[in-house]
Amino acid sequence: MRRTIMVAALLLGTGATLTGCDVLKPKSSKSDAVVKESEFPPRPLWGDTHLHTANSVDAFGFGVRLGPEDALRFARGEEVTSTTGLKAKLSRPLDFLVVTDHAEMLGGTKALADAPGPLIRDPTMRRWHDMMNEGPAQSQRAMAEMLDARGRNAIPPAMMNPEGAKERTHDVWNANIDAVEEYNEPGKFTAFFGFEYTLMQGGNNLHRNIIFRDGPDKVRTVVPIDPTYKTTPDEIWNYMEAYEKSTGGRVLAIPHNSNLSNGLMFELTMPGGGPMTAAYAKRRARLEPVVEITQIKGDSEAHPFLSPNDEFAGYGVAGWELNNLLGNQPKVSSMFAGEYVREALKRGLALEAQMGVNPYKFGLIGSTDSHTALSTADEDQFFGKHSGNEPNPKRALQPQNLGTRKGRFGWHYLASGYAAVWAKANTRAAIFDAMERREVYASTGPRMTLRVFGGWDFTPDDLKGDWVRAGYTRGVPMGGEMKPGAKGAPRFMIAALKDPLGANLDRVQVVKGWVDKAGKTQEKVYDVAWSTPDSRKPVAGKLPPVGDTVDVATATYKNSIGAANLTTLWSDPDFDPALRAFYYVRVLEIPTPSWPAYDAVKYKLKLPPEVRVKSQERAYSSPIWYTPAKG
């Protein structure tokens, strides 16, 4: 225990403490200016940048009845009652939250359900109205019909009434701003303004979450815009640039679920074809500095088809590699390269070599995409994707045939993920700035602490002293760029600390991507630190498994294996100063039970063998890039 506490201090910096469990109450002070920023970020702040409430067209249709205020209270640590009547409370509060209700038909299904039935003339809309008022099951069927209609561009014109939608959007947006501002408490809990721009070309997921740095005075000057029938992100980028120009504020976009884009999220060309231009690449890199790599609808780090030599590739892939988001277009293996983040980082290097700009130089975060208004990413208290996935005996094996989707079941959903941000204060400005500089990392749920610095002259003695200061003053943190000019290979100071309430760590890996001398992209995964190194020796270059203490029958595990912390100074043994490269860190926990295993024990279920009952949860750091000298 003493060693764990000492390593916590090493990771977090002098005077830092782990996230507390006190429930926070709203305060009257709303200015970031009252909070002093530290010299260096003292600890990671944990949050969710992707959460839906009853104001989202699909969440309400699925039956969810909790609004933004419920979501904020829950994230701050209060107990709330879920849509299905269950008591819900986080084991630890979050540090920040972004409510990102869909801009498309914002509040639309709620307005339809609340409308006087006899006044609804369109027969399809009247049927949906009636179904949404008949209970959760019928409401979900209505939503399935709406998703199918959305995929076919067949939403009834009456439901898309521009004037009615514009007025409703304005009212819902302003009410949301009021709720967010009420629960924002600089220095204690940060509530951001945001929305989701649900770009979905033919059912292919090209969604972005839009997050504002600013307060209500600036954000009230705009309203979310509806992406219906748009095919490229240009409109939302125009919106963002116009907002910044007119208000002097700042805004960023976070793409998510690239794994359901059918190859369109990270293309090598312009949208629709043609060589990518440097102007397009520069614009995208500036406006989209962060990507959501893991969430409830699967993990988008790597796919075994693309990374056959990575034994840990493919986490959270099952069920999501069949087709696109709506299921109306099947997926083929040639699409994977445009969907997975590691390949996108490699593509970014190749495009930079061609035109001097990297469109995919982004940081990595996780978030939930929960449509329950509850930000839960813990396996033992997972409240699911929507109200039908809130804890119940049927959810693990329940078909998820929403819209035209086929072949997906409840157990395919992941209890994932959270965003960890190395910010200098718990304020909108400091957290936003950390996202912009990409000093962030993703977790599939566990709140493990991960810190990484890249430099040229780090030594083992640095890890014995004020290594955080050394990292910032003589190197760059995760998300940074290393410039040439030093001899030898780059060195990385890496430290990982287990979630204090969670599982021990198995290993720390560095994932390297580069462009070789022939212009082809390459990758390699290095095991750089692991538990019990004296007894676990690599065999033929492969590290033996850490072991497995999971008892599926009781949904328990033991921390009798693994390590509480792993720290190392690693140097790239294959470094070539002439080749551009990136490095990111992946930390793996020991095996632990997955949420279907907890359900099986709670509800006395017998699960079929294909159901995922245990896994090795993980964290992904943002990359550090190396760019060789020109010439």
Image (cartoon, grey):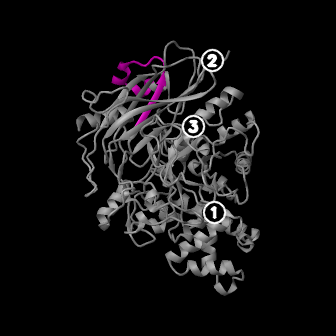
- Circle 2 Cα neighbour tier, 10 Å, few/some/many (<14 / 14–19 / ≥20): few
Numbered mark located on residue 629 in the image: 2
The amino acid at mark 1 is: Trp
To which residue does mark 1 refer?
Answer: 173
Residue 554 visible in rendering? yes
Tag nearer the camera, 2 or 1 = 2
Classify residue 108 by image quadrant.
bottom right
Q: Residue at x 63, y 63 (%)?
A: 174
The amino acid at mark 3 is: Glu
Q: Gap between marks 3 and 2, in whole Å?
A: 24 Å
Where is residue 8 drawn, in percent x and y? 33, 36
Q: Residue at x 41, y 49 (%)?
A: 445
The local secondary structure at tag 2 comes to loop
Reply above or below: 570 against 64.
above
Residue extending furthest top?
487
Where is residue 338 drawn, in percent x and y? 62, 42
Q: Residue at x 53, y 69 (%)?
A: 62
Q: Gap between marks 3 and 1, in whole Å?
A: 37 Å
Tag nearer the camera, 3 or 2 = 3
Judging depth in this view, the residue of 390 and 222 nearest the camera is 390
Query: Does 593 sit left or right of 104 as displayed?
Result: left
| Quadrant placement of the N terminus | top left
Judging depth in this view, the residue of 619 and 537 nearest the camera is 537
Judging depth in this view, the residue of 70 and 495 nearest the camera is 495
The magenta stretch is 450-470
Instruction: Judge whether residue 235 is colored magenta.
Output: no
Reply above or below: 258 against 64.
above
To which residue does mark 3 refer?
Answer: 343
